[in-house]
Amino acid sequence: MKKIILLCFLASTSVICSQNNVTESILEEGKLLFRLEKGSWYGTDDMLSRFESKKDSIGGYLSYETDEHLIRTIFFSRYNTDHILIRYTFDSLPKIKPLQTDTIHKVASELEHSLIKIRQDARDRASENTDNFFSFYENTALNFIPVITEKKRTVFVITGPQVSGIVILGNDYKLSYNKTNEFKTKAKIHKSILQFPYTSEDKDNPTVSTIHTHLITEYISSTDICTLLLYKDYVEWKQHIVMHDKEVSIFDLNKETLFTMKRKAWEKIYDHEIND
């Protein structure tokens, strides 16, 4: 498994970084995926503490955003996926305690039915992996995040660690579906998998920034942003940089902002700081 840790320091410069429609969309999507995963985290914790007796009957879970911009997390039955065992409602940015817990209204809505269907299809494709498209690594697990908007139906697949102390980027995928929830295409978002420890081994030299390279896409991915936000309270580094041949993406974990600049401009700044 390839492991890369690069320390990087951005000195103050007069360069104006920018965003465009593409990067604004990436940032928005990344923050949505983060909120969905946060709801799933908190929903799972609550389910295990309060409804452990239901655990063996659960076939899966997912989260989605309501029309009111709240986050709803559902756990559905392994015997009938349209049967909802627990339905949580969280704030738009989920907090540990849900706003509402519902174990009475058990029939899946039309939206929930579609989300479950594409999630399960993506999960089955990864499990069968007949064309070896998906990669699997020790001490990791694939997480499936279905998203349905007016324009598209997508399942994002991200790799999460099953050990503490590391953040995983890469080994993520995007599966697309049509309006009737039929599979269309699948694509890899990264070509590899990277591990970043929460902290530096050298206490006198904490990690300031982490960095990785994109070969497939010009900008940071929404899955990168989702993962970085999920772990921002655990890591000592507060900035992540994605390098591409043409573009450089700079994501601030604290401010939750994304800026980009041309690779040529970045290299000029870097050379200036090194030689100054």
Image (spheres, rainbow, N blue to C red):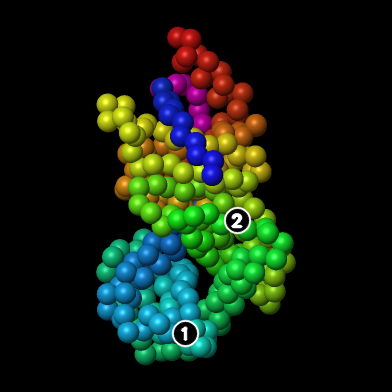
Q: How far across and down, in percent of the image, does residue 217 sit?
A: 64, 43
Residue at the image position 55 percent from the left and 60 percent from the top: 157
Q: Amino acid at mark 1?
A: Ser
Q: Residue 48, position in %: x, y?
A: 31, 74
Image side of residue 41 versus residue 194, left or right: left
Residue nearest the viewer, comparing 179 with 156:
156
248, above or below 77, in the image: above
Q: Nearer the viewer, mark 1 or mark 2?
A: 2
Dividing the image into 4 quarters, which one contains the C terminus?
top left
Query: In which image quadrant can residue 204 be found?
Result: top left
Main SS category, magenta section: loop
User: Residue 190 in the image: x percent, y percent?
Assistant: 60, 47
Q: Amino acid at mark 2?
A: Ser
Residue at 58% over, 74% down:
120
Quote the CA–CA distance across marks 1 and 2.
27 Å
For this orientation, the residue located farthest to the top is 276
Regarding residue 148, the answer to whether it shows in the image is no
Determine if the magenta segment contains residue 16.
yes
Tell me the number on the disc at residue 90: none
What range of the chain is rendered magenta?
Answer: 12-21
The residue that appears at 36% across and 32% down in the rendered structure is 207
| Residue 210 in view here | yes
Q: Which residue lies under the disc numbered 1?
A: 77
Under circle 2, the secondary element is: loop
Q: Label 2, on which residue?
A: 135
- The secondary structure type at the circle numbered 1 is strand
Identify the residue shown where x is 48% and y is 79%.
59
Q: Residues within 10 Å of mark 1 (few under 14, many from 20)?
A: many
